[in-house]
Every structure is written in C-alpha cells, then in structure tokens.
Amino acid sequence: METSPLDITQREFTRKMRGYDPEEVRTFQEQIAEEMTRLVQQGNDQAALIQRLDAQVKGYQEREDSLRNTLVTAQKMTEEIKGKRQTRGGPDRERGRAQGREAPRSGPPEARPGTGRDRRAPAPARALRGQITRSPQDPPRSPGGPARQACRPQVSSAPPVVRQDGPDVILTVHVQPRASRNQLVFQGADRIALRLTAPPVEGAANAACCALLADLLDLPKSRVTILRGETSRRKQVRIQGTSAADILTRLQAG
C-alpha cells in the first residue's frame, strides 16, 4: 500500500488514557510529509532528466548511423569512379605506351630535337608538289604558253595532300596523338604525319594540331582550323589566305 504525504498528514489515531501527545504526533506527521514531498519531487526531477538524456542519446545514435551510412556510400562511389577510370583509361594508356615506343622507330631520322620539324625529308616534300591543285578561280601565278602548261605536273587520282581552295589551302594530315614530342614528318609522297603529345580527349589533339601547323607555317592560330575529321586521325585543315606552293615551301624549309 502506497502512502502519500497527504495520507500521513490526515491520519487519525485512537486516543487512550496513556496515549501520545496529539500535538507532538501532528508535528511529527508534518515533518514526515515534508520529507516525503521532497523525495517525491526529487524522484520526478530525476525521471524527467533521464527522459531528456535518453532522447539526446537516441538523437546522437541516429546521427551516428546517418554519418556511417554517408561514409559507406561515399566510399562505394569512390571505388566505382576509380573502377570506371581504370576501365576507360587502361586501353588508351596501353595504346599510348605502344605508340610512344614505336614512334622513334617509324619515320625518318630527326635533325634537331625539340623543334618539331624534320629537316631531312626534302624529297617527299618535292614529291608533294605534284599533288597541288588550284581552284578554277585562281589565275596562273606566272605567264606561260601551252608548252609550259604541258610541263606542269599532273594531279594524281587520289585526294591531294595539299590543294588550293579559292584564297585558302586545304592540307590533309594524319595525326598520331600521345607521341613523345610534337613533330611533322613526311611519310612518302602522299602522306604528312603530325606527331602530337596531346591525347585525343575533348579536342586537345585538334587544338595541338592547329597550334603546331601555325607554328611551323609562321601564321596566326586563327588562320588554321579543322575542316573535317575532328574525331578522326585523318584530318583536313583549312589554312586561310595563302597558296599551296607557299605552304609546301614553308613546310620544306621548316
């Protein structure tokens, strides 16, 4: 049976001849009631404090679980990204390494390192002159009769490497990305190769191709643009405001 402070205060005792002093009993009951009230209030305060602490602990546990899940998810995403990069970059790196090992062996010997120009290939450059074509709108550069015109070299049936297109020149090149150095190489009479250190990623090889040709021809970069083959190794480059003969002369001199 539970006893409250009010029960203690209102408790009545049977009076006898030699019983206790009623006033003393009443005073003692009031003291006990006050002590019990204090203890009950203290117990209620502790219970409320325990509830608040339990709520805080539960909140901390939920935060800990959320952070743990976030870390696990981030780790999984990082591993997936690394796996995709390795999957995508593996074949390209192997091809680049193979081309880098084969690049010095293929092509003519180099005369001067670091310049990107091959001075030991004048013969293919002279052979390329036979593939120059002029636009019908271009007048002949020098007067001459039928005999001189008959002596002009004939255009081959294959697409010309260098041809005149109005005021511009169309130059066909074969690009070899991921090379050990930037270099122009004549490969026979009908092929010009550009070895570029840039990779074929996000237009880097196209930009490097235009920059190298502009440097070799001593022209502004704005006059050298990719006409066709932006995603192919065989590219047609438009060079504005010049002639095919001038382009060949500069490439041979470079």
Image: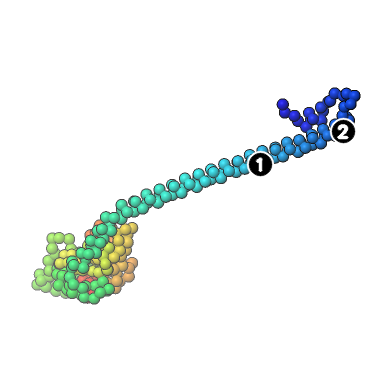
Whether residue 249 is visible, yes or no, is no
4, 119: nearer the viewer: 4
Residue 79: percent from left, percent from top: 38, 50
Q: Is residue 144 above or below residue 191?
A: below
Residue 49, which numbered label? 1
What amino acid type is highlighted by mark number 1? Leu
Based on the displayed image, in which of its 4 quarters is residue 94 positioned?
Answer: bottom left
> Measured along the vertical axis of the image, is residue 57 above or below residue 106?
above
The residue furthest right is 17
Q: Quadrant of residue 10?
A: top right
Q: Which amino acid is tagged 2?
A: Glu
* Residue named by callout 2: 24
> Left of 73 or right of it: where is 250?
left
Calculate the distance from the C-alpha at mark 2 to the C-alpha at mark 1: 38 Å
Q: Give x and y (percent) for residue 107.
A: 18, 68
The residue drawn where x is 77% and y is 37% is 35
Residue at 90% across / 24% down in the picture? 17
Q: Does the residue at mark 2 contact the one at mark 1 (Cβ under 8 Å)?
A: no
Q: Earlier in the sequence, mark 2 or mark 1?
A: 2
Residue in front for this viewpoint, 154 or 226: 226
The picture places residue 201, in percent across and down from the top left corner, at: 32, 58
User: Is residue 214 visible in the rendered structure shown here?
Assistant: yes
**Residue found at x 24% / y 58%:** 95
Vertical placement of residue 79 versus 179, above or below: above
